[in-house]
Image: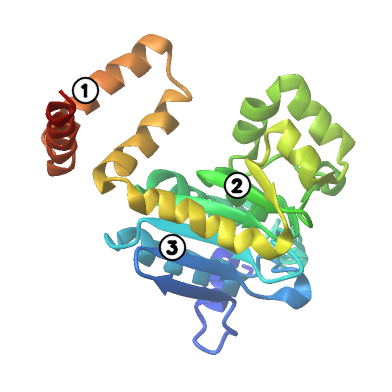
Amino acid sequence: MGKPLYRGMVAEGDDPAAPQRIVVDRSSDRAVVTLDEPDRLNVLSAPLVRQLRRALEELVADNDIRAVVLTGADPGFSAGGDLRMMRAAIENRYQAEGTADVWRWIRREFGGIARLIAGSDTVFVAALNGPAAGVGLAWALTCDLTIASERAVIVPAFARLGLIPEVGTSWALTRRLGYQGALAYYLKGEHIDAETAQRLGLVHEVVAHEQLLATADEWCSRVAALPPHAVAMTKPLLRTAADASWNDALMLEEFAEPTCFTTAAFAGSVETMLSGGARSR
């Protein structure tokens, strides 16, 4: 019986002697999380993935953190999956649990991070500073906002490797590009520059490279300027509405809105507007 692949990768990722591959910079109500193995374009090694998951779990559990920026150490965002780990998966396919172990890693680690991003009340801003491929790109497309520097490049590498869109990429692509656009994206496998990515709807905004993190911070400030409950409730509402019928979306809003009426933030806004209106008369 071969060595259990999933447990081996988890052990490698959790090894206290493993190099630090994630940098977390907290500042008041926000944090910047940087994938940090620039020599390999922030490839998704076991230490990086496990460290990232732990960091994000801590941040989304912290009620003081309202927004998280996810970026990479220059010159790239992420080259995607680690080819060394892929080779180990190939060698393991007829041993132990074979592809079931690969499934565990994809679902629990890659998918686990995507679910953390999508399922939390925290707003995630992806700041693409360079090439983004594979699962790294999938995480960026899962974020609530994706902004790009002029140096960013979207790299559709799935087909070339004999893989399918993964970790939520098929969902993101079909909703932004439509079925035919998503299939063309997959079949062509062409690199997409930042301006084209914005035109296609893959990124929200393109800025000068030197302004990328400052722009991401401005989005964090927009989050911080709003009542916490409003942003926390709107994120899951909009994500659910993306897959709901018009009638179901309307009903979701009808159930959620009364809660907002009970908050001090809403009451204060109403009183402020009424007082201003009284003075104007």
Label 1 is placed on what type of residue?
Phe
Q: How is the image coloured?
A: rainbow
Which one is closest to the eye, mark 3 or mark 1?
1
Which one is closest to the eye, mark 2 or mark 1?
2
Closer to the N terminus: mark 2 or mark 1? 2
In the rendered structure, find residue 182 and report the number of the disc placed on it.
none
Q: Secondary structure at mark 3?
A: helix
Give residue 22's position: percent from left, percent from top: 55, 74
Q: Is residue 162 left or right of residue 100?
A: right
Q: Quadrant of residue 229?
A: top left
Q: Residue at x 69, y 69 (%)?
A: 42
Mark 1 residue crowding within 10 angstroms, few (<14) / some (14–19) / many (20+): few
Foreground residue among 265 and 1: 265
In the rendered structure, find residue 255 and report the number of the disc placed on it.
1
Q: Residue at x 67, y 71 (%)?
A: 73
In the rendered structure, find residue 56 and report the number of the disc placed on it.
3
In the image, residue 206 above or below residue 89:
above
Asked if the residue under mark 1 is in contact with the one under mark 3, i.e. CB atoms within 8 Å, the reply is: no
Give residue 1's position: percent from left, percent from top: 62, 67
Q: Is residue 105 left or right of residue 31?
A: right
Q: Residue at x 58, y 53 (%)?
A: 126
Closer to the N terminus: mark 2 or mark 3? 3
Which one is closest to the eye, mark 2 or mark 3?
2
Q: Secondary structure at mark 2?
A: strand
Res. 105 in view: no
Task: Count how many numbered circles sit on residues in the image.
Answer: 3
- Mark 2 sits on what residue? 146
Closer to the N terminus: mark 3 or mark 1? 3
For the residues labelled 3 and 1, the Cα–Cα distance comes to 30 Å
Give residue 71's position: percent from left, percent from top: 61, 62
